Amino acid sequence: MERKVFKVFNKNREPIRGDVCIPDYNRRYPVIVMSHGWKGFKDWGFFPFLSEVLCKKGYIVVKFNFSGSGIGEDMQNFTELEKFATNTYSKELDDLERVLDELEKGNVCDRFGYFDKVGLLGHSRGGAISILKASSDQRVKCVVTWSSLALVERNSFMDVLPQWKREKFIMIPNSRTGQDMQLDLNIVEDIEKNKIKLNILKAASRLDAPCMVIHGEKDETVPTAEAHQIFKELHLSRSRLEIIEGATHTYGVKHPFEGPTPEFKKALALTQEWFGNFLK
């Protein structure tokens, strides 16, 4: 198993930093591209462990930091708060598209991937981005979401929208790091301008790729009802909903990673099964 880092650039010439895990260089493999959530990053908590396990099962696994994640060259700390402040759903969609484009060109894992066998795995907002992208990109053959949003207009954001528009920004606490992280109006303007493009449920209804929706019964961030909303829109013959009993938004895992929990192991086993059925 080999791991190498890569850096590609989005259309604004902003760097997208990632790494790729390749089982070996003796043959080609299906590819899984993982997308982290809001206030997350590619090396948060379970992502490195998850990447390694899937790689050992015979997949090339690509994980990356969205250009507006707030994570820069220091891969563990939020040092690019100005990029975090102006990040949007549309930017993240563009970033994922660029990663797929560069993957197809051989600039991520050379020519060792089957680029007609690409799966997406996204957590939280990354799950929503994966659904939105897969619904319009024929390169994506399979999707798994963990704790995905069903709506971009979050209640917590909409509750402060008048103040947000009046002051042009709001401050969001990061309980893990103790930082106050600014959010400018960019994300609000993006949602208002692109209501159709960013409609996750409509995207789910158009999705041709088989999709498994995994969610925690005790998700404290994204209500379980949103998993049911997504599943209701999917093609029933090519979709599956799994609510994991007792699981939180991150399946009991914290950062730094201290090992897999029973809830995480269940999500991982389901993920392996789905990709094994539809990607290999």
Image (cartoon, helix red, strand yellow):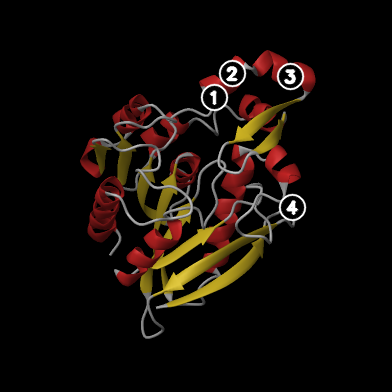
Marked residue nearer the N-terminal end (3 or 2): 2
Rate crowding at label 1 as few (under 14), some (14 to 19) or many (20 or more) other CA atoms within 10 Å: some
Q: CA distance from mark 3 to mark 4?
A: 26 Å
Q: State left or right for residue 205 relative to residue 244.
A: right
What SS does tag 1 mark? loop
In front: label 2 or label 1:
2
Mark-to-mark CA distance, 2 and 1: 7 Å
Q: Is residue 106 visible?
A: no
User: Residues at badges 1 and 4 in contact (C-beta under 8 Å)?
Assistant: no
Residue 158 lies, in percent from the top left, at 59, 18
Q: Is disc 2 in contact with disc 4, using a CB cutoff of under 8 Å?
A: no
Q: Is 133 displayed left or right of 179 in the figure?
A: left
Label 2 neighbour load within 10 Å: few <14, some 14-19, many 20+ = few
Please identify the quarter of the rendering in which residue 5 is found. bottom right
The tag on residue 158 is 2
Q: Position of residue 106 (x, y in %)?
A: 54, 73
Residue that appears at 31% across and 41% down: 214
Horizontal arrangement in the rendering, residue 240 relative to residue 89 (left or right) = left
- Which callout, 2 or 1, points at the residue further toward the start of the chain? 1
Furthest residue toward bottom: 26
Q: Nearer the viewer, mark 3 or mark 4?
A: 3
Q: Closer to the camera, 107 or 42?
A: 42
Instruction: Return the mark for residue 153.
Output: 1
Q: Mark 4 = which residue?
A: 12
